[in-house]
Amino acid sequence: MQLLEFEKPAAELEKEIEKLRSKSVAQNLDLSAEIATMERKLAETRTAIYQNLTPWQRVQIARHTQRPFMLDYVSLAFSDFSELHGDRHIGDDASMPGGFAMLGEHKCVVLGHQKGRDTKENLKRNFGSAHPEGYRKSLRLMKLAEKFSMPIIALIDTPGAFPGIGAEERNIAEAIAFNLREMMTLKTPIIAVVIGEGGSGGALGIGVADRVLMMENAYYSVISPEGCAAILWKHRKHAPEAAEAMKLVAPDLMELGLIDGVIPEPIGGAHHDHEATAISFREHISQELDHLCSLRTETLLQQRYDKFRRFGEWNEA
């Protein structure tokens, strides 16, 4: 597993525990007391590390290759997933899968960005950066959800929309802008969850929702810390300072009122325990769906409009 620099103290303790277990088996020794002591120390070390993460460390976790991706959540938290393909204009986009699924008792449409864990899969998924047809496909699925009175769950995990020449030729800016407008008026509940990276308009293109939630170690920002550092400090090495200044992690965004909730991850981050993370995800989304599905359509639309109109308000002294 990819090991982040700040995780090394915990990783070293894990190795020591494994050595004790191997020694216990090989030499038929009772080392249970020593192992229990080391395990307590490991738990304390992990807690100390993950309760005091800097914004830059959270960005690193959000990008971890072993973190659960969109289709991991679909397989672990949803059931009866039936993927739909194509935008009915250009083609399909593997970086933005979506389809019908069940979340508990709720029939819904789930869609989002999908990354890859190796070179072959990343090329297929375009590193999680969607093309225009990905956003047009997602809107087609959202319109189906509205037609059949199903809630929409959008899982955001992208460094940004694809900036290539082909994407510009097929008008990616228009595709994202059209989604922003249409999502504001869809007559069905919408929940967006930032599960990893929430980069720029690529994230916002499926992020207009009644509830915008974030996983505990995700980030959501108009630009990456490296991009901000390159502009303001003229060098990417200042990304940690940029991440601190940009207020892009879940606790800061929650305090600013830009998101509606934070979904906790297990100690050690989502990349250490996919199943526990999926359980936490499912519980929080189910609670939000229960509430949103009980609202009248007029109330839902008015609350969605008011929510986004409040962004950017300020008081003059």
Image (cartoon, rainbow, N blue to C red):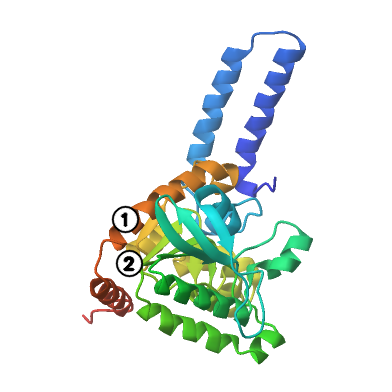
Q: Amino acid at mark 1?
A: Asp
Which of the image's four quarters has the C terminus?
A: bottom left
Q: Which residue is mark 2?
A: 257
Q: Which residue is mark 1?
A: 290
Say whether residue 69 is visible: no
| Labels 2 & 1 near each other (Cβ < 8 A) | no
Q: Tell me if 284 is positioned left or right of 55 in this view.
A: left
Disc 2 packing (10 Å; few <14; some 14–19; many ≥20): few
Q: Nearer the viewer, residue 231 or 114?
A: 114
> What residue occupies the far left of the structure in this picture?
317
The answer to which quarter of the image holds residue 23 is top right
Q: Nearer the viewer, residue 182 or 45?
A: 182
Please give the name of the residue rendered at 57% of the width and 76% of the height, measured from the top-left corner.
137
Please give the name of the residue rendered at 49% of the width and 71% of the height, measured from the top-left corner.
221
Q: Secondary structure at mark 2?
A: loop
| Image position, residue 283 (x, y; %) | 40, 48
The correct choice, above or below, for 94 with respect to 69 in the image is below
Q: Tell me if 92 is positioned left or right of 267 in this view.
A: right
| Image position, residue 262 (x, y; %) | 40, 55
The correct choice, above or below, for 58 with respect to 38 in the image is below
| Image position, residue 230 (x, y; %) | 62, 76
| Image position, residue 129 (x, y; %) | 63, 72
Q: Secondary structure at mark 1?
A: helix
Q: Earlier in the sequence, mark 2 or mark 1?
A: 2
The correct choice, above or below, for 103 with respect to 135 in the image is above
Marks 2/1: CA–CA distance: 22 Å
Q: Amino acid at mark 2?
A: Gly
Please give the name of the residue rendered at 28% of the width and 71% of the height, measured from the top-left corner.
300
Say whether residue 91 is visible: yes
